[in-house]
Image: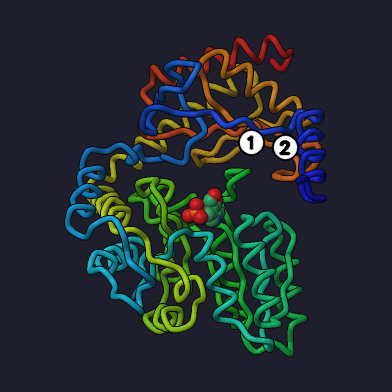
Amino acid sequence: MSTNLDTRIHAELEQFMADGVYKRLNYLASPQAARVEMEGRGSVIILSSNNYLGLSNEPAVVAAGKAALDKYGAGTGSVRFICGTFSIHRELEAACARLVGTPASLSFVSCWNANEAVPGTLLTEHDLILSDQLNHASIIDGLRLAKAITKCQTGVYKHGDLDDLRAKLAAATDRRVKMVITDGIFSMEGAIAKLPDIAAICREHGAVLVVDDSHASGVLGATGRGTAEHFGMVGQVDIITSTLGKALGGAAGGFVAASEEVCDYLTQRARPQLFSNALPATVAGSALASIEFLEQHPERVTRLRENARYFRDQLRGLGFAPLPGETPIIPVILGETSSAIRMSNLLLDEGVFVTGFGFPVVPQGQARVRCQVSAAHSRADLDEALAAFKKVGSRLGLI
Ligand SMILES: Cc1ncc(COP(=O)(O)O)c(C=O)c1O
């Protein structure tokens, strides 16, 4: 029997296809690496993965995941305070805190959960949280949830606009706790938050600063400690959230890094912590090994940076105009969503996997293909990808 829901979603799915925005999943039969085996396509260079340091398939990381599976078993059994918490979670949390430079950290099954936990647990109806306009969807939903749960005030400041942030904080005279949240690296732009200025404004107004370093952990700073290290500000950010699902092994998981008391309070009260199972031990094991690998191999971060610089410069040399920046996220703006999807499809025909993004993920008229470079790419991989960009760019009249 078909319901109204069936009728509605059927019509919407048809419309996605008619509009050229329907997403088809590409199935992989090999690990995330510079090249992957894609069903129906064979070997493809992947230029759209968050596997920034190439650790997803690093032997030591995979071995540590297997060892943790053997030692702790497959399941966590329940939530941490009910059935016990594995010692590997404590080790992982110590490593996350050490990496980003805070006294403590608390792991979650995803950074999505971490971003929901922070405002929804720490704020009350007397408080305010301000979020950068281009923050990640998990932060946006975290604010919506916090507003519904705690009745706190929420607000958005224009992307990177320090005057707007200052004015909104200054106007919030009746708020007891003021919190400001920003991505460290904005994932669709590759831009880095103006952390020194934002931190100074927060100090001026007694606001708590939260940075989501999901795209910056393992990426920014000489040793990959994130946005704070990039600006020489390790230890100066009140709360950092980040993912274990990108540079740090790429499996899954997230964490909140902060003071002992903030982490303790989240352990007591955060709903994603109290009512959802912990990160599987095997994932905690591989994430821990990723952080240890990063600590021993800062040259991976250097290589990532060199690859990003090379690819951006060469794209420019071909006549493309990638957004300027210094991160491994390199977007090329094309305008209409259908243009981005077409370019992405043509690149895939040439054996290069780069995703096209359109509205509503990015603003209307600013659809793009977003390249993400990895330390795993060799110069030959990058040159082959650039040759595909040259061919497709000429065919589409872009260069
Ligand atoms: C800035 C940012 N925050 C949070 C997340 C969510 O991370 P996770 O996959 O661990 O839920 C992402 C993932 O895309 C992200 O880019």
Q: Is residue 144 visible?
A: yes
Amino acid type shown at disc 2? Gly
Mark 2 or mark 1, which has the lower sequence index?
1
For label 2, the SS is loop
Q: Is residue 287 above or below residue 98?
A: above
Q: Which mark is residue 218?
A: none
Q: Is residue 29 above or below residue 159?
A: above
**Quadrant where the C terminus lies?**
top right
Question: Nearest the camera: 150 or 73?
Answer: 73
Residue 12 spot, x, y in % from top left:
80, 40
**Which quarter of the figure has residue 396?**
top right
Residue pointed to by mark 1: 323
Q: Residue at x 74, y 13 (%)?
A: 397
Question: Nearest the camera: 48 or 116?
Answer: 116
Q: Is residue 90 above or below residue 188?
A: below
Q: Residue at x 37, y 28 (%)?
A: 30
- The answer to whether the residue bearing label 1 lies less than 8 angstroms from the nearest atom of ligand 1 is no
Circles 2 and 1, Cβ within 8 Å, touching? The answer is no
Q: CA distance from mark 2 to mark 1?
A: 16 Å
Amino acid type shown at disc 1? Leu
Residue 333 spot, x, y in % from top left:
70, 32
Mark 1 residue crowding within 10 angstroms, few (<14) / some (14–19) / many (20+): some
Q: Is residue 30 above or below residue 80?
A: above
Q: Is residue 214 visible?
A: no
**Which quarter of the figure has residue 346?**
top right
**Mark 2 or mark 1, whichever is nearer to me:** 2
Residue 316 spot, x, y in % from top left:
60, 23
Q: How many marks?
A: 2
Residue pointed to by mark 2: 358
Q: How is the image coloured?
A: rainbow
Residue 160 spot, x, y in % from top left:
67, 57
6 horizontally vs 284: left or right: right
